[in-house]
Amino acid sequence: MNGFFDIPSDLGNTYFGLIGLHLREALLPVLAGLLLALPIAQLCVRFRWLYPPVLGVTTVFYAIPSLAVFVVLIDYTGQTELTVMIPLAVYSLVVLVPAIVDGVRSVPEETLAASTAMGFGPVRRYLQVQLPIAVPAILAGLRVAVSASISLVSVGALIGNQGALGNLLADAQKYGRPELAVNSVLTTAVLAILCDAALVLVRNLLTPWMPRGKGKRPKEAAVRQERSEPEKAELPETPEMPEKAVAR
């Protein structure tokens, strides 16, 4: 186990330092992508004709290999974290924009009409009515974007050791230490799982009205129904009348 966590000195970081670096390079681009996707999605909802070309452009960007984007950006941003984070932010748009658009479009027309009648303008209605209702769809997109970003950070190892945990893959080959590669893969997978669990927790906190478990609902419904029904009083048995009535 000592070799598993023995990080080569040429990386200039400890094991936990690489984890912090990996999370920073993965999560900040997703946050930037979310801030960019919110107004873009609102425009796509307001002007429906804009949605297909926006989705096409983001899909084309996502199809461009990250290494090719790195080569173009190096001339402007150098071999820095920013070179890694810019394409990751752009890649997140292909997931976040459709998630937000679908979530906002799922808001019932009656709800929108009620908010308009209450005096909500377009911006206030979007922020206080549409986005809160679209939270489940938005967080579903965030879960995909965060997992993808955490995995793609490792590609940054090809440009001046900017891949955080991905740098361990290069050093595993350089020093003939396969345990470093195992460390990189396992730690990256654990980070993706933990971040996904954190987003699920955030969704549960922000959407308390959503059902949490399907297995308990029928049983709880049966208990509520049993409690709501009045207990049937047992009626005494009616005695049988004699065959011959007593004459008065």
Image: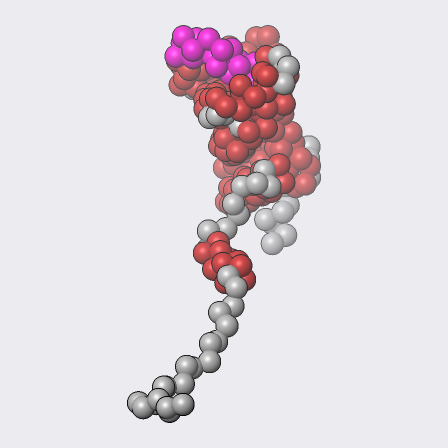
Position of residue 239 in the picture relative to residue 128 (left or right): left
- Quick check: is 39 in the magenta stretch? yes
Percent position (x, y) of residue 206?
62, 36
Q: Find out whether residue 49 is within the magenta segment.
A: yes
Residue placed furthest toward the front: 248
User: Is residue 83 or residue 199 the one in the foreground?
Assistant: 199
Q: Is residue 244 left or right of residue 156?
A: left
**Magenta-tinted stretch:** 32-54
Name the main secondary structure of what is drawn in magenta.
Answer: helix
| Relative depth, front residue between 173 and 143 | 143
- Vertical placement of residue 81 versus 192, above or below: above
Quarter containing the N terminus:
bottom right
Nearest to the observer: residue 46 or residue 62: 46
Residue at left 53%, top 28%?
Answer: 134
Q: From the viewer's perspective, tell me whether residue 37 is left or right of residue 80.
A: left
Residue depicted at x 51% and y 68% = 231
Q: Is residue 37 visible?
A: no
What residue is rendered at 55% in x and 29% in y? Answer: 133
Q: Does any portion of residue 111 appear in the rendered image?
A: yes
Front residue of 144/131: it is: 131
